[in-house]
Image (cartoon, rainbow, N blue to C red):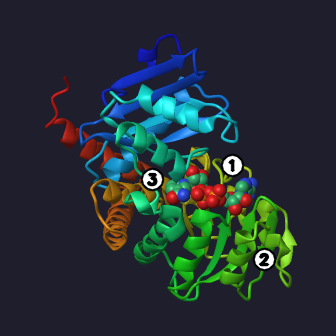
């Protein structure tokens, strides 16, 4: 990148802010990508290193996700350079909050390395943040499992587009964390059975069905799913290529690649994690007849919930909104993909892009 403007296109970014304060050691980047639909919402990441390009890419992903979900918010992202377990984290987060106090078109939310406590500190400093503790009016999205709940809705909506009935379907979950375990629950409630579950310790497999609540209890006790007695244990990657009908990658980016796409048995992939598949692997899956519901459609439950919280809504209101938005968006994206013979991701980007440009027609950028 020769100039920050190399990052720009007609959608954004609108503002790129570097914050540096030698007195308190704060180094941070904030990218406000596009605010045509409303003030941007996006997570505050705390990681030891970051590039402006990465922050801008994450902010753009939020613009698409928020527009696709029909939220009155644009996309933004912030990265604080630091170690999430460092001493003095509270002071650094509070200093960051002061640094973004005047960026009123950026609403911070939790992300890697920050949590609801960090959001409470930010709200205390500048009066705005989402993903707050319950006592501050927050809706604890990981505790209630809203993103996993949304994946269950996406599965139901996708049923009509693939040769699968959720009732009786075999499900593999890669990454049995906040998103993965609640997705497993949501699908089990619809009659599916969990046949593979993995975490960073490995994968457990049982075609007869794994007991979801027992696996959740193990994770709550700080153990790995592989400590479950009675199921076959394999390396972590085994969940991706397990014998199943529905695959939910819910751990890390880039786990579905050109090297393993051909070995995937699932006919429906619901992307719980962000960018779990490379673009060429998504194309390969499409060519194999696998339906892939892309991340920013399938895993939008968290940000929809954050938006409902920001506008003073309740937990049950958040569930209703997540169900309604994810159902209609999944159906629209899969219909567009089928009718125009493009990848669901391309159909989703077109749909979100139309919504962003329509909102921009009303915007006057001062
Ligand atoms: P989490 O930390 O609660 O769970 C992640 C799980 O993945 C853990 O159980 C971990 O052991 C496991 N894991 C790590 N590396 C693995 C590997 N190589 N193979 C298999 N399992 C592995 O995180 P989360 O909140 O559930 O988020 C999961 C993903 O979904 C992340 O990419 C996150 O950015 C994305 N996401 C989360 C939300 C949300 O609401 N929490 C919303 C949208 C997207």
Residue that mark 3 sits on? 296
Please say if 120 is above or below 299: above
Residue 197 falls left or right of residue 148: right
Q: How crowded is the residue under tag 1: few (<14 C-alpha within 10 Å), some, or many (20+)?
A: some
- Quadrant holding the C terminus: top left
Element type at marker 3?
helix
The alpha-carbon separation of the residues under discs 3 and 1 comes to: 21 Å
Please say if 137 is above or below 167: above
Residue that mark 2 sits on? 205
Contact check, label 3 and label 2, Cβ < 8 Å: no
Quadrant housing residue 246: bottom right
The alpha-carbon separation of the residues under discs 3 and 2 comes to: 28 Å
Residue 103 falls left or right of residue 168: left
Percent across and percent down for residue 119 are: 47, 46
Residue pictured at 64% horizontal, 34% vertical: 88
Residue pictured at 26% horizontal, 45% vertical: 354
Please say if 227 is above or below 334: below
Instruction: Find residue 258 and name its label.
Output: 1
Query: Does the beta carbon of the residue at mark 1 sit less than 8 Å from ligand 1?
Result: no
């Amino acid at each position: 990148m020769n100039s920050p403007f190399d990052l720009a296109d007609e959608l954004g970014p609108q503002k790129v802010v570097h914050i540096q304060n030698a007195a308190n050691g704060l180094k941070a980047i904030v990218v406000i990508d596009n605010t045509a639909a409303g003030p941007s919402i996006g997570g505050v990441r705390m990681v030891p290193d970051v590039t402006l390009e990465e922050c801008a890419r994450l902010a753009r992903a939020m613009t698409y996700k928020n527009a696709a979900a029909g939220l009155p918010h644009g996309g933004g992202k912030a990265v604080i350079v630091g170690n999430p377990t460092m001493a003095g984290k509270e002071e650094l987060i509070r200093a960051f909050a002061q640094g973004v106090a005047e960026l009123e078109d950026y609403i911070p939310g939790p992300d890697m390395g920050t949590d609801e406590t960090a959001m409470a500190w930010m709200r205390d400093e500048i009066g705005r943040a989402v993903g707050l503790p319950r006592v501050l009016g927050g809706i604890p999205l990981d505790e209630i499992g809203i993103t996993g709940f949304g994946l269950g809705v996406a599965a139901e909506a996708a049923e009509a587009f693939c040769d699968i009935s959720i009732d009786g379907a075999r499900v593999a979950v890669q990454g049995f964390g906040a998103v993965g375990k609640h997705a497993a629950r949501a699908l089990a409630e619809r009659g599916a059975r969990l046949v593979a579950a993995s975490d960073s310790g490995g994968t457990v497999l049982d075609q007869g069905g794994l007991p979801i609540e027992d696996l959740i209890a193990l994770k709550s006790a700080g153990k790995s799913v592989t400590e479950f007695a009675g199921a076959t244990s394999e390396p972590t990657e085994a969940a991706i290529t397990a014998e199943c009908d529905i695959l939910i990658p819910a751990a890390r980016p880039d786990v579905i690649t050109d090297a393993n796409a051909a070995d995937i048995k699932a006919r429906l992939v619901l992307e719980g994690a962000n960018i779990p598949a490379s673009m060429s692997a998504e194309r390969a899956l499409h060519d194999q007849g696998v339906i892939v519901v892309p991340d920013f459609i399938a895993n939008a439950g968290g940000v929809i919930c954050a938006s409902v919280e920001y506008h003073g809504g309740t937990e049950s209101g958040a569930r209703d909104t997540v169900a309604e938005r994810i159902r209609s968006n999944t159906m629209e994206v899969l219909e567009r993909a089928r009718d125009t013979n493009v990848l669901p991701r391309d159909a989703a980007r077109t749909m979100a892009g139309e919504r962003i440009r329509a909102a921009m027609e009303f915007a006057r950028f001062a």
